[in-house]
């Protein structure tokens, strides 16, 4: 039986009028109430009611772009490039422009699910999901179910920088080779003679964190280095890099290199070393990941893995509008390029 507005109201324990206000967005509703209504909408798979039900399988001119943090250059570059591609080329199909909207989740799993529900309500033409996934089976299942509902209604789904999902709901996946990049960074430092290498990892619950760390550890293992005690997890921000580097120095006073989960974290690592009177790269080499715009201009220039963020974002935008063909099997691996700059050097020999 098809769910009705009254069913949603009963499930959320609010009035039908409140449900309408939440869904139409034309009246302020308390955040907690809004979340409760949207959860009920999702649980009951309520899409449209009454005369509008015939439009349930139609799509609008809306494209949603989900990011963890729009202030983070990693996500800003991807989203900006996708939005530009949609704006520049959106009129190609039938002369209809698309409206692309950035949905900033703040890293919240609940907000990610809420935005997908709202995009389903708006019958979005396409949804682009960026960045690493949360490593939680229950959340992964919920996201997969929401994407399947969107796809069933005609929405094109593109993943950019996120691991592939099982099933056939996703139109295309652009998966970053985080493991390969992590391995190349570690191999570069090992080749320079480093054996005491610290690693500042990202949040433990993110796929990006695990994949980059796995690549790093694989290279160390091949070199016969067991350095699990020199891994510190934190957020993907400068402060985390600063604090984690101080912790690494506490754990090993003879540290010769630090690899950071991303370039912003690497800047924090450099600041911590500088504040301790430790030169980069004279005493300790530092490497990042991503090659964000500031990386080449940092002093010293930051050795990192360049991910083609703008190119990937633009391709995701074109895939969302069916302007580019989907890759074979629906999945394309986006490889990184090692960018060697002045922040890494051969290990200084004693004496």
Image (spheres, grey):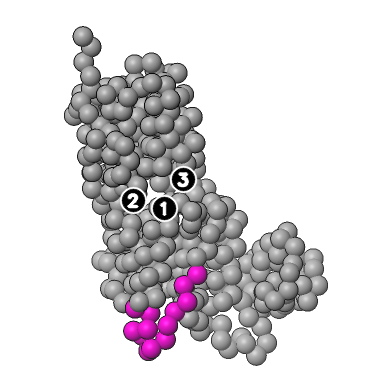
| Residue 290 appears in the picture as rendered | no
Magenta highlight range: 89-101
Whole-number angstrom distance, CA of label 2 to CA of label 1: 8 Å
Per the rendering, the mark at residue 185 is: none
**Which residue is denoted by mark 1 in the rendering?**
73
Do the residues under discs 2 and 1 have CB atoms within 8 angstroms?
Answer: yes
**Which residue is denoted by mark 2 in the rendering?**
293
| The magenta stretch spans residue 63 | no
Q: Is residue 51 above or below residue 170?
A: below
Task: Give the image location of residue 281, x and y in percent.
Answer: 28, 28
| Residue 288 appears in the picture as rendered | yes
Disc 3 or 2, which lies upstream in sequence? 3
Whole-number angstrom distance, CA of label 3 to CA of label 2: 23 Å
| The magenta stretch spans residue 97 | yes
* Residue at point 43%, 35% (across, down): 268
Secondary structure type for disc 3: loop
Per the rendering, the mark at residue 206 is: 3
User: Toward the viewer: 70 or 131?
Assistant: 70
Left or right relative to 167: residue 145: right
Mark 2 vs mark 1, foreground winner is 2
Disc 1 or 3, which lies upstream in sequence? 1
Task: Give the image location of residue 52, x and y in percent.
Answer: 62, 87
Q: In which quarter of the image is the N terminus?
A: bottom right
* Residue at point 73%, 59% (across, down): 32
Left or right relative to 90: residue 1: right
User: Toward the viewer: 327 or 82?
Assistant: 82
Secondary structure type for disc 1: helix
Q: Is residue 68 above or below residue 11?
A: above
User: Toward the viewer: 129 or 77?
Assistant: 77
């Amino acid at each position: 039986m098809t769910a009705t507005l009254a069913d949603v109201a009963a499930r959320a324990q609010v009035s039908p009028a409140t449900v309408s206000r939440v869904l139409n967005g034309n009246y302020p509703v308390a955040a907690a109430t809004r979340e409760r209504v949207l959860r009920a909408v999702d649980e009951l798979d309520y899409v449209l009611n009454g005369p509008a039900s015939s439009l349930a399988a139609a799509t609008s001119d809306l494209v949603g772009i989900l990011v963890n943090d729009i202030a983070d250059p990693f996500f800003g570059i991807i989203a900006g490039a996708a939005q530009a591609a949609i704006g520049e080329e959106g009129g190609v199909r039938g002369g209809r422009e698309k409206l692309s909207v950035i949905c900033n989740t703040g890293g919240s799993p609940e907000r990610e699910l809420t935005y997908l529900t709202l995009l389903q309500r708006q019958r979005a033409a396409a949804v682009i999901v960026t960045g690493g996934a949360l490593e939680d089976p229950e959340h992964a299942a919920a996201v997969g179910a929401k994407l399947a509902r969107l796809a069933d209604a005609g929405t094109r789904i593109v993943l950019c920088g996120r691991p592939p999902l099982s099933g056939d709901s996703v139109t295309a996946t652009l998966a970053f080779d985080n493991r390969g990049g992590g391995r190349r960074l570690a191999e570069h430092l090992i080749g320079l003679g480093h054996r005491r290498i610290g690693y500042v990892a990202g949040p433990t619950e993110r796929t990006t964190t695990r994949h980059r760390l796995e690549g790093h550890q694989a290279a160390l293992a091949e070199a016969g280095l067991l350095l699990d005690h020199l891994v510190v997890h934190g957020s993907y921000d400068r402060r985390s890099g600063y604090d984690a580097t101080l912790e690494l120095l506490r754990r090993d006073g003879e540290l010769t290199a630090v690899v950071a989960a991303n370039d912003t974290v690497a800047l924090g690592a450099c600041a911590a070393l500088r504040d301790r009177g430790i030169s980069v790269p004279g005493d300790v080499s530092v490497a990042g990941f991503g090659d964000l715009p500031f990386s080449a201009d940092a002093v010293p220039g930051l050795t990192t893995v360049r991910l083609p963020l703008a190119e990937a974002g633009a391709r995701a935008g074109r895939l969302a509008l069916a302007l580019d063909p989907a890759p074979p099997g629906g999945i394309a691996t986006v490889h990184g390029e090692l960018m060697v700059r002045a922040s890494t050097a051969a290990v200084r020999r004693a004496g």
